[in-house]
Amino acid sequence: MSARSDRLAALEAIARERILILDGAMGTQIQDLKLDEAGYRGERFADWPVLIKGNNDILNLTAPAAVKAIHHAYFEAGADIAETNTFSSTTIAQADYQMQDLAAEIAREGARLARESADEQETLTGAPKAVAGAIGPTNKTLSISPRVNDPGFREVDFDQVRTSYAEQARAMAEHVDFFLVETIFDTLNAKAAIKALIDLCTEEGIDRPIMLSGTITDKSGRTLSGQTASAFWYSVRHARPWAVGLNCALGADELRPYIAELSRIADTRILAYPNAGLPNDMGEYDETPDQTAAHLGEWARSGLVNILGGCCGTTPAHIRAIAAAARGATPHRPVSAERAMHLAGLEPFELSA
């Protein structure tokens, strides 16, 4: 088991030589457990007043062995980095289950389980295995009103979102190597997360590299809050992320042009973990490991990416195939930051020096 600083240094060295592999979808693997309501509740929450089936993060407390086994499966498939099972471990998201007071505990245990699995794999293989603290977008949006007839209404404000993210990150910090703000559909939510992470660094000395991953919601090429991939990057580049990229919503075939756009303009590593194709009529994902890997292998050979993994519908078999397809490919070389003023609303704006 290596110290965090040594592990990060080793990963940075490896990233200069090959493409790093992120894990796949936690949700897919949890669905395969086919847990009923009692399976989610365990003994501790047997008498909880509301239904909690579907709260995947609570399994950090009620089924920790199952969560840890999923991490193991992805590491064994070739992952260098595992995401914690904490996508919804904020007070805002957990309020749906009346579990907001448990959010920090859920986040802490999710990070601890991933760290234990990573440490065991490091001991077994001698290779660095990192943990990314997964920070999801919450189920509220700062940019869009949920009321059609009241466009100025918001269910939460910026400080509430920032505080919620800060609590989650603080709880995970001991066990993670990175913070991964992911599935960003609203850039203002992401800015609240970035502000929380910067505050933790400056005020409490909690300093972890940040990775950011947006989501293009459909073939319009925009996030849900309306930004193009370029505008998204210009809106978050002040965070100086260790990596930036896209995940979810689209399969690899549909996502490629937006990853290519980020690789053209971003002066950092490029991260990509698409879905296993688009969902079918039953909401399931039909793309096989070989099909997903064929797409991502081409991205790797084209020099577009530094980190590859999988989102919805991907399994350890997908990650194994992706790792094989990316083997031997030269990682993306980030562009040099150009001297210009970049601004962004829904579209990017550039004023050259």
Image (cartoon, rainbow, N blue to C red):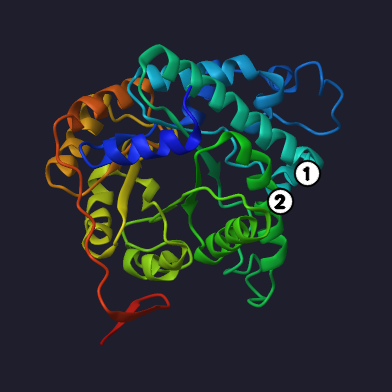
Label 2 packing within 10 angstroms: few (<14), some (14-19), many (20+):
many
Q: Is residue 19 above or below residue 221?
A: above
Q: Which mark is residue 92?
A: 2
Depth check: give the residue in front, 172 or 350: 172
Q: Residue at the location (61% across, 14% down)?
A: 65
Horizontal arrangement in the rendering, residue 251 relative to residue 52 (left or right) = left
Q: Residue at x 20, y 52 (%)?
A: 333
Left or right: residue 329 versus residue 32 is: left
Q: Secondary structure at mark 2?
A: helix
Q: Is residue 54 left or right of residue 320?
A: right
Image coordinates of residue 316 in percent, x first then y, are: 37, 21
Q: How much space separates mark 2 and mark 1, taking CA atoms?
A: 7 Å
Q: Secondary structure at mark 1?
A: helix
Do tag 2 and tag 1 residues touch (Cβ < 8 Å)? Answer: yes
Give above or below for 119 relative to 348: above
Instruction: Provide residue 72's location: percent of width, then percent of height.
Output: 46, 17
Can residue 129 be seen here? The reply is: yes
